Image: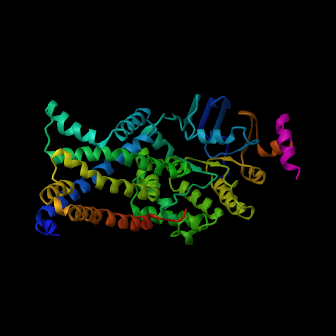
Amino acid sequence: MTTGASSGEPLVVLAGVNKHFGDLHVLKDVDLTIHRGEVVVILGPSGSGKSTLCRAINRLEPIDSGTITLDGEPLPEEGKALARLRSDVGMVFQAFNLFAHKTVLHNVTLGPVKVRGMDKAAAEKRGRELLDRVGIGEQADKMPAQLSGGQQQRVAIARALAMDPKVILFDEPTSALDPEMINEVLEVMTQLAKDGMTMVVVTHEMGFARRAANRVVFMDHGKIVEEADPETFFTAPRSDRGKDFLSKILSH
Amino acid sequence: MGALLDNLALLRDGFLTTLRLTLISAALALVLGTLLGACRVSPVPTLRGIGTAYVELVRNTPLTLVFFFFVFVAPQVDLKLPFEVSAVVALSLYTAAFVCEAVRSGVNSVGVGQAEAARAIGLTFMQTMSQVVLPQALRTVVPPLINIFIALTKNTSVGVGFFVTELMAVGIRLTNRFPADILTVLTGIAVCYLAITIPAGVLAGRLERKVAFAR
């Protein structure tokens, strides 16, 4: 068990990344390096560009300028090369996005079978192991709609893990959940972090950020305002906007 | 009744021709229309352009004109097809435009998150469509598709003006020969069309229930 060392080699490197939505400049010259085994939590007020940044890493949002490299390889524009690269980047969405017409197990095995060409039986065996690991092994043969939000999100995590990704992106994974279901998802994520998975997490869960992050990245108005280890950021933020943000969320 | 009963063989041939035109054209239109529908939602602008141009051109042209093109114009550029084949080509190309639009609206009914999740695990565009989007689109596509195929069944009657001996042609031949029995003959022809379209509707209902699932 390693608590991700930020001394690992660079895995995801963003350099001079810019992105506009029409007139809105959502990412402004963003530079960010994520090292292997590192857990980076991206914080910031809504509209700060943190979700866009997260989605840019596997090119669900194309960027206007700058470069993003994954494991030394620049993100391809479109087509098969991009699909191959995406298969190494797990993604967990706010709205879960489980495949509604497939069982829980088949949600987890679709990628390994279709993308990795894995044998179906082997994929199902592995799928059941992963579902056990996130604590929902007994739900394997149900349809997603029969599960609670927390259970669905854990399936989504298992689906990402099934691809043996180099890094997993979490785009506000608990924001659509009822309060009593948030912890079951955060526990799975904390365990993943302890196991050494490289993670980029956009979240409003400050407890998770404190507990599991190696580094906190604070964004505002499309810019990275501050980067620090969580203890430093939460106790002594350097930027005024960081202080302001923390005072708003930690006061209650 | 005699007009019909004495000419059952002719009626049967007409019915089978109509059925053949319908089934072959429906199958071809389904394949072509689905491909065009995929073009219209693809990330490649050229493909989207091709899909849109096809739909706008073909959907807005009268079917009779499409028939004219393949029966009278195509032979001038040395594309000589048997009349029934021309009819199948015209009907398939025409119907594909409508299938394309049904498929496109079905694809749009599937939440964008489904395609994003599929792309995020590394599925290619074609895999995303075939594994995730189209199976879910099917649910909303079945009812409009069956309307399109019922329209196709009736559209085969345009073949009457282009030397295809389908049901309508048989009907016209019989009413010319037995003017007194015109009502009987035309009713008989209508029943033959119903014999195709009503089972199609029933099949659609079953199919709709089969592809339904909770979201």
Q: Nearer the viewer, residue B116 or A9?
A: B116
Our reading of the magenta stretch's main secondary structure is helix
Image height of B195 relative to A226, above or below: below
Which quadrant holds residue B94?
A: top left
The image's colouring method is rainbow
| Residue A10 visible at all | no
Q: Which quarter of the rendering shows the C terminus of chain B?
A: bottom right
Vertical relation: B34 (above or below) A31: below
- The quadrant in which the N terminus of chain B is found is bottom left
Outermost residue, bottom direction?
A138
Please name the residue shown 44% across and 61% down the image.
A123
- Magenta span includes A247: yes
Vertical arrangement, residue B127 with respect to residue B74, above or below: below
Residue A43 pos. (x, y %):
74, 43
Q: Position of residue B132 (x, y in %)?
A: 46, 54
Number of marks in the rendered image = 0
Numbered range of the magenta stretch: A236-252
Residue lying farthest front? Answer: B180
Rendered view: A52 above or below A199: above
Front residue of B203/A236: it is B203
**Residue shown at 44% from the left, 33% from the top:** B45
Instruction: Please say whether residue B190 is one of the residues in the magenta stretch.
Output: no
Q: Is residue A145 visible?
A: yes
Q: Position of residue B184 (x, y in %)?
A: 22, 65
Q: Quadrant of residue A13?
A: top right
- Report whether A201 appears left or right of B140: right
Q: Please name whichever residue, B2 or B67, is drawn nearer the observer in this view of the structure.
A: B2
Query: Is A58 positioned to the left or the right of A188 in the image?
Result: left
Residue A214 percent coordinates (x, y): 71, 46
Question: Which residue is found at the position 69% from the left and 60% from the top?
Answer: A187
